[in-house]
Amino acid sequence: MNIGNLAINGGPKTRETPFGSGARYGETEKKEIMEVLANDRLSYWSKFKVNSFCDRVKEYFSCGYCAGGSSGSAVIHAAVAALEIPPGYEVISSPITDIGTLIGVLYQNLIPVFADVDPHTYNLTAESIRSRITDRTRAIIVVHLAGNPCEMDEIMELAREYKIPVIEDCAQAYNSIYKGRKAGTIGSAGCFSLNESKHISCGDGGFAITDDEELFYRIHNYLDKYYDRFQRGNRMFRLAPCYRLSELQYAVALAQLDKIDAITDTRARHAESLTRQIEHNAAISVPKVYPHSRSSFWFYMFRLIPGKISCSINDFVKALNAEGISAVAGYIPRPIYLEKMFTEKAFFPGGVWPAELAAGKTYTYEPGLCPAAEEVLTSAVRVPVSEFFTSRDVDDIAAAINKVLAVYRK
């Protein structure tokens, strides 16, 4: 074991120079913004760039309807609300996700229930979902983590069996493909984020797509205080937030839409190259993407196999960092249900959880609830992948991983 070869111990660094970067916004975004300013109306209700954006989204996804909102979290909230589930009922989702997936569930006074994940794809499985279905289950939110599509045929078959609607959280899954279908077009609704960190962005924003006309109208209304924008006779029929997006944001998002294919194609190519270069290591598990799927690789996350590495995950990450690679441990620190908000059920002030009162039963969130998810997050290492990277950037990431593994694998 030549530990002196590692940069962390004084050896040469794998990478001395910055990784490839570039500008996300350019002349096309400026052109769209200037057209909005020339129109002299910034509210989304002017329908100038709003309609153009939604029309392009419908064309790109081959879907019937699109509704825009202020964030990915907002459109998931609206989609959950549009299902019109009474308080106290359950919604099954993933334990490896951002709180944005669950905000709408909690605000609608519903109960989040967590199914476990596949340890290689990091996604919910139909088997794990089935184990969590009760007579109080009213919806499923699948999360296509890092852009790797869930096994949707099995999940949709289960959903049809129990007559449960499925919402797809596609915040990280632009142009992710499952058996020839884009993620977001398979369930009842697909929800996308336009946050600064996502594949395409307008700073903050989001949109939901669906082929269900009535669901679309309800999603649209829940994004806009339930005003009767379509003159259908249901003005303020429900309590709804204000999740509107401005014409300026839609203008930027419109320009960004043209970049999806190039961005995701490049990321997939880089990630596949990285996998080929490191998958021979018996001490790690690379992310599994099924042959019938394509991941858009919002990030790249592999796992250290317990018992086959002689250092801690934190030491492994530190060694990669010293090599010039910006690796981090895990995706989120722990499954979302182990955050204090869940373990103490501190969703609202005063120690009262209205959803639990409505359910007439007590729920607990504790270690061991989803063993595979807990194992994934304690053994995962995440490295960046970017459309601005060069082949050399990817080769250097692979070289650093192989170098550190050569020292620390048992």
Image: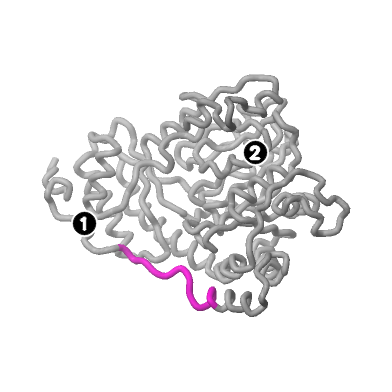
Q: Which mark is residue 107?
A: 2
Residue bearing the label numbered 1:
14
Residue 326 horizontal side relative to residue 35, left or right: left
Q: What stretch is highlighted in magenta?
A: 19-30
Give the foreground label among 1 and 2: 2
Q: Could you tell me if residue 128 is visible in this image?
A: no
Q: What quarter of the picture does the N terminus occupy? A: top left
- Disc 1 crowd rating (10 Å Cα; few below 14, some 14-19, many 20+) is many
Residue at x 51% of width, y 46% of height: 145
- Disc 2 crowd rating (10 Å Cα; few below 14, some 14-19, many 20+) is some
Q: In the rendered image of this protein, does residue 55 appear above or below residue 94?
A: below
Residue nearer the viewer, 248 or 60: 248
Q: Which amino acid does label 1 sit on?
A: Thr
Query: Residue 54's x, y, as percent?
Result: 68, 65
Q: In the rendered image of this protein, does residue 192 appear above or below residue 4?
A: below
Q: Which amino acid does label 2 sit on?
A: Tyr
| Residue situated furthest right in the rendering | 233
- Is residue 115 covered in magenta? no
Residue 221 horizontal side relative to residue 144, left or right: right
Residue at x 38% of width, y 44% of height: 302
Q: Could you tell me if residue 327 is visible in this image?
A: yes
Residue nearer the viewer, 80 or 284: 80
